[in-house]
Image (cartoon, rainbow, N blue to C red):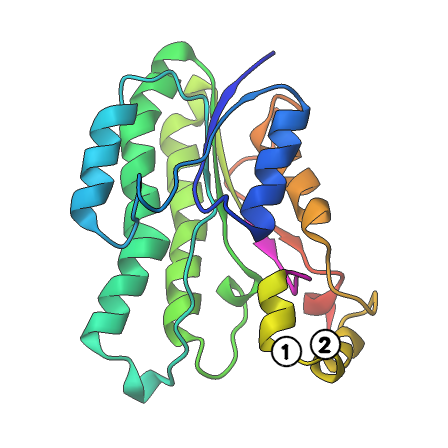
Amino acid sequence: MKRTVLITGAARGIGAAIAAKFQQEEHIVITPSRAELDLADPKSLETYIERVTAMPIDILINNAGINILNPVASIDTTTWQTMLQVNLTSPMRLAQALLPGMKERGWGRVLSISSIFSLVTKEKRAAYSMTKSGLNAFARSVTVEYGRFGVLANSLCPGYIDTALTRQNNSPEQIAAISETIPVRRLAQVEEIARVAYFLASDENSYIAGQEIVADGGFLCQ
């Protein structure tokens, strides 16, 4: 069945791959640009919500996120508020706007792209880990309140992904070193994550709900 899916942060990387997968399966895909929807700007978010509330959106994929590195002692209020707004508040507000329609139609999917760092962490990732952990908790809450109406919510927790940004921020030697820490000895391709996302957010998934689905090549097994 053809569904309508809204994907944030779909200009590149995982978001672009997820959008391509849904388009390949002939679904209607909405991918707002930064000019249309700036998740860091509450006013932009609320304006966009007014536009989409009346649309029959079946699937919400909260993919956009930011990671500003800071040790715990150095997390300033501005940084914290920005990360909280983009990574957690905006996904919640979009879901709040779209869940009533999903409930009325008796079918819906809310998938948030979280991270393995919502389950473990490392230095300078405190704010990122906290906000991504919040997405996991949100998926559980949506499931408990809306599962009876055919709405399934999950979070997908990718590990290390081979993206242009990863290549930009890490030398080939650093990427090789990271790969050695992963049991399958390589980074994931965005298409691999997109296939998991598609399963969780489409009709193919009929019973997985409220879960953190890890796709990390076995990294967390260690």
In which quadrant is the N terminus drawn? top right
For the image, the number of numbered tags is 2
Q: Label the magenta part by its dominant secondary structure.
A: loop
Is residue 159 within the magenta segment? yes
Q: Residue at x 41, y 51 (%)?
A: 135
Q: Name the residue under label 2.
A: 175
Q: Earlier in the sequence, mark 1 or mark 2?
A: 1
Q: What stretch is highlighted in magenta?
A: 156-163
Secondary structure of the residue carrying tag 1 is loop
Viewport quadrant of the C terminus? bottom right
Residue 148 picture location, percent across and down? 43, 21
Mark 2: which secondary structure? helix
Q: Is residue 60 above or below residue 37?
A: above
Q: Nearer the viewer, residue 118 or 43?
A: 43
Q: Is residue 39 visible?
A: yes
Q: Is residue 212 visible?
A: no
Left or right of residue 104: residue 176: right
Q: Name the residue furthest left.
A: 43
User: Which kind of residue does numbered mark 1 sit on?
Assistant: Asn
Which residue appears farthest toward the right when viewing the image? 184
User: In this rendering, would 219 be left or right of 1?
Assistant: right
Q: Is residue 206 magenta?
A: no
Residue wearing tag 1: 170
On residue 194, the disc is none
